[in-house]
Image (spheres, rainbow, N blue to C red):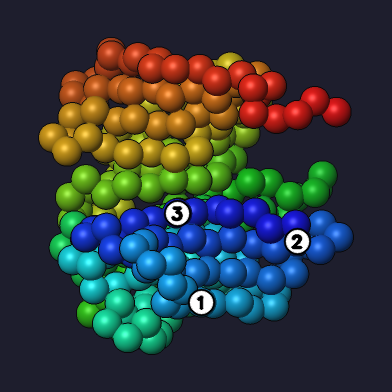
């Protein structure tokens, strides 16, 4: 079984990238990442590795690079950077512990933000623990790791607003599964804005509007998907929220 995790268009619309994981008996058997010429369908780049999960892909805003988040079964995860000139590996940035469920370039194409987490050992199994990694492509220093105050969470989506600020979305496990949307600063590693909710399972993807004023995120609720927008102006508690649509699971999933 193969699951597609991420899709990305190049800024000029010439290339389409996809990443996914092939499973065998419930475990990762092979990770795959491909880039196609959107006009001809020719496969320009391919990455097929046994035991490696390809979790997310993203093109740089200048169109010169493709980033892929990789999660090997046994070793540390990494951010792979590929040149779009020749589709050769340009840089590989390891990080640990954990895995990155989403990855994005900052608008200047010089930095990468990866979000995800790991499962910390606990007496009753393991505890979801969110992490954010920030890497500068012009530096040999290891990525900075941001540690949220509330650790019972995973991050599943990221979208940079500027070279310094970025949005993340995910799910919190403290009081049942609840989604959360947060804004962070690259420079200080601090959380600047946060909106948490209850009664839903968790956020899946997040995007900021071109004017940096409105957040749109996809929510996986208990019975349906929701597309929700929130104003980021002012206090998160008083921010306007609008549900644009709801899609029940039974519309897209066959009953068993």
**Residue behind mark 3:** 7
**Residue behind mark 1:** 46
**Residue behind mark 2:** 23
State the image quarter where residue 217 is shown.
top left
Seen in the picture, residue 155 relative to 66 is either above or below; the reply is: above
Q: Are marks 1 and 2 in contact (CB under 8 Å)?
A: no
Seen in the picture, residue 29 relative to 3 is either above or below; the reply is: below
| Nearer the observer, 45 or 176 | 45
Give the spatial CA distance, label 3 vs label 2: 19 Å
Could you say whether the residue bearing mark 2 is in a helix, strand or loop? strand
Seen in the picture, residue 100 relative to 225 is either above or below; the reply is: below
State the image quarter where residue 124 is shown.
top right
Whether residue 232 sits left or right of residue 128 in the image: it is left
Residue under the point 19% across and 21% down: 234
Residue under the point 69% across and 21% down: 250
Could you say whether the residue bearing mark 1 is in a helix, strand or loop? strand
Give the spatial CA distance, label 1 vs label 2: 18 Å
Quarter in which the N terminus is drawn: bottom right
Give the spatial CA distance, label 3 vs label 1: 14 Å
The total number of labels drawn is: 3
Residue 202 at x, y percent in the picture = 55, 31
């Amino acid at each position: 079984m193969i699951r597609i995790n991420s899709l990305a268009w190049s800024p000029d619309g010439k290339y389409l990238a996809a990443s996914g994981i092939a499973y065998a008996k419930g475990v990762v058997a092979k990770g795959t990442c491909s880039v196609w010429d959107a006009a001809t369908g020719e496969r320009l780049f391919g990455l097929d590795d046994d035991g490696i999960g390809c979790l997310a892909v993203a093109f740089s805003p200048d169109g010169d690079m493709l980033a892929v988040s990789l999660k090997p079964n046994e070793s540390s995860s990494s951010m792979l950077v590929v040149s779009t000139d020749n589709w050769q590996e340009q840089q590989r940035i390891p990080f640990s512990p954990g895995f990155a469920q989403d990855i994005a370039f900052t608008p200047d194409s010089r930095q990468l933000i990866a979000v995800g987490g790991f499962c910390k050992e606990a007496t009753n199994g393991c505890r979801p623990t969110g992490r954010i990694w920030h890497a500068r492509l012009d530096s040999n220093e290891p990525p900075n790791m941001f540690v949220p105050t509330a650790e019972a969470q995973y991050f599943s989506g990221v979208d940079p607003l500027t070279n310094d600020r970025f949005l993340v979305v995910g799910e919190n496990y403290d009081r049942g599964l609840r989604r959360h949307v947060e804004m962070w600063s690259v420079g200080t590693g601090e959380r600047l804005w946060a909106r948490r909710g209850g009664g839903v399972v968790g956020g899946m993807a997040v995007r900021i509007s071109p004017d940096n004023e409105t957040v749109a995120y996809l929510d996986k609720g208990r019975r349906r998907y929701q597309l929700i927008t929130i104003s980021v102006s002012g206090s998160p508690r008083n921010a306007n929220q609008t549900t644009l649509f709801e899609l029940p699971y039974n519309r897209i999933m066959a009953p068993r």
